[in-house]
Image (cartoon, rainbow, N blue to C red):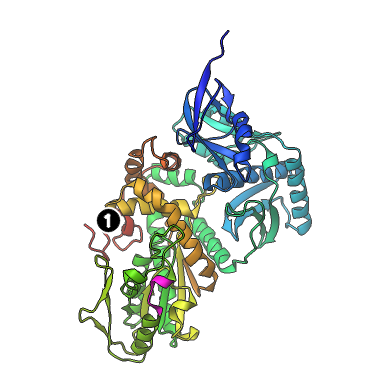
Amino acid sequence: MEKKHIILSLKNGELHQYDKGITLLEISKNMQKQFATPIIAAKVNNEIRDLQFSVINDCHVEFLDLHTEVGSKVYQRSLTFVMIAAVNELFPKGEVTVEHSLSKGLYCELHIGEKITSDHLIALETRMRRIVAEDRPFTMKSLPIAEAVELFKANGQIEKVKHLEQLKRERVRIYYCGEAYDFFYGTMAPSTGYLKVFELRQHASGFILRFPEKETPNVLPEFVVQNKLSEIFLEAERWGAILQCGYVATLNEYVQNGKINDIMRVAEALHEKKIAQIADFVSQHKEVRVILIAGPSSSGKTTFAQRLTVQLKVNAMRPVALSLDDYFVDRDKTPKDENGAYDFESIEAIDLELFNEHLSKILAGEVVSIPCFNFLTGQREYRGKTIQIDRNQPLIIEGIHGLNERLTTAVPREHKVKIYISALTQLSIDNHNRIPTTDTRLIRRIVRDSQFRSHDALTTLNMWQSVRRGEERNIFPFQEDADIMFNSALIYELSVLKKYAEPLLHKITKEHAAYSEATRLLRFLSYFQSIDDNEIPFNSILREFTGMSCFHEHK
């Protein structure tokens, strides 16, 4: 019988003919010499596939190695599964939970009925390395939902059971590694042998599972202690405990039972109480003259600054806002990035000398003529705007460089309070599948860009990696220098954002490279029950993205 063939086109335009039914893994072995690091997954017609996938039709394939964002996530997810398998073998009655990202890794907790020691972690890492050395295959099976539910009921994983029972699907993908099996939000590497670079590091009551970054996938990044960020994650856990809602399935139950409004009110009250506490901190430190607010994209900085202003006024203070945007250098002096495009997120895009000169004069009580930057002409203009403040009027400065000491060198450190804000969700999908902070912010930004900036979801997704690179350079290295951290996440927000984001993501079609990311986000949002946003307070941070905020002119 004559063999049937398929034509496969690669990202570089090459065409190859293969037997119908060949796996991506077999093809990748022929292509590996073109890559600096192991191929770990692939895009087939802009859909993410693991390398077990059999090719039966002509298609376009982009192989993904460890230098890619997707490849790095597959590595992390697969390594997490190795850790879970090792825990199952060492501590059959124990459980490991994946809590959140921290210090270039994942903070996890091991629950075995006794305090975790370095000996436990040495044993766990040793078993993980044995599993990697054995090069066990990761095998995916598509099971009927009912069968998968019974599988997880048998080993007492109740949150997974509740989650699977809520999925509106007939089948679900379950991955196996030896005797271990689990449900994961994403694909796996072909086998454990791909996962050689990692370590476990003891931290707090648990440990950090560390892995390489995509820029340097063959070595672990330098370990950076993040005690302040760790504390804000612990606060997020405490808030989740107050709300009695740690998993998506539980949130959905509140929606179904008509009790979600109680959750919304308490979540908003927690925000208001925290902002009031920050205002109290500032007012009690009379030496503070400048309040700097920084955080990554879509963290809610603008609304937070407005709400903090209100609380400061309650404390008899009269803060004045100073915009960094008005201190951009003229366009011809703007630095450029490695691609030759203007880098407006570089601190060099700000006239630091003029800004600090004005800061000194303003804090000395002088009348200062403030510039206005004309974004159409790319030039600084003066339109008669002036600022003069007294001793009881702190300056509020919001912007991505707020934590960088270079921004405000003219102001002594004791006269400044630095606030870092981000959206660190308290929710997880289940005990092994966390919700990344970046996903929450990305969905916020997709909604906001559509509502108020006339950008479609494709535009937002295409620029997101550039935004993330700017955050890695300009924000994250300075976050531990913050005096205060504020978590802007609302436990119910993805159930609200769902109805705004889904129609926008559905418009991205298969011919776009961002289709794989759009389908991933749609699958993620499908886990949430929608809720109406009529009950959201008009001063909520969420209103910055959906509209009708009392602090903005959005209609």
- According to the picture, the residue beneath numbered tag 1 turns out to be 452
Would you say the magenta stretch is mainly helix, strand or loop?
helix
In the image, is residue 342 above or below residue 522?
below
In the image, is residue 66 above or below residue 547?
above
The picture quadrant where one finds residue 399 is bottom left
Regarding residue 121, the answer to whether it shows in the image is: yes
Percent coordinates x, y for residue 509 in the rendering: 36, 36
- Residue reaching furthest to the top: 1
Quadrant location of the C terminus? bottom left
Element at label 1: helix
Query: What residue sits 42% from the left and 46% below the top?
Result: 254
Regarding residue 531, the answer to whether it shows in the image is: no
Percent coordinates x, y for residue 375 in the rendering: 27, 66
Q: Nearer the viewer, residue 529 or 459?
A: 459
Percent coordinates x, y for residue 145 in the rendering: 52, 29
Say what amino acid the circle numbered 1 marks. Phe
The picture quadrant where one finds residue 298 is bottom left
Q: Residues within 10 Å of mark 1 (few under 14, many from 20)?
A: some
Write the start and end of the magenta stretch as one range.
348-352
Q: Nearer the viewer, residue 541 or 405?
A: 405
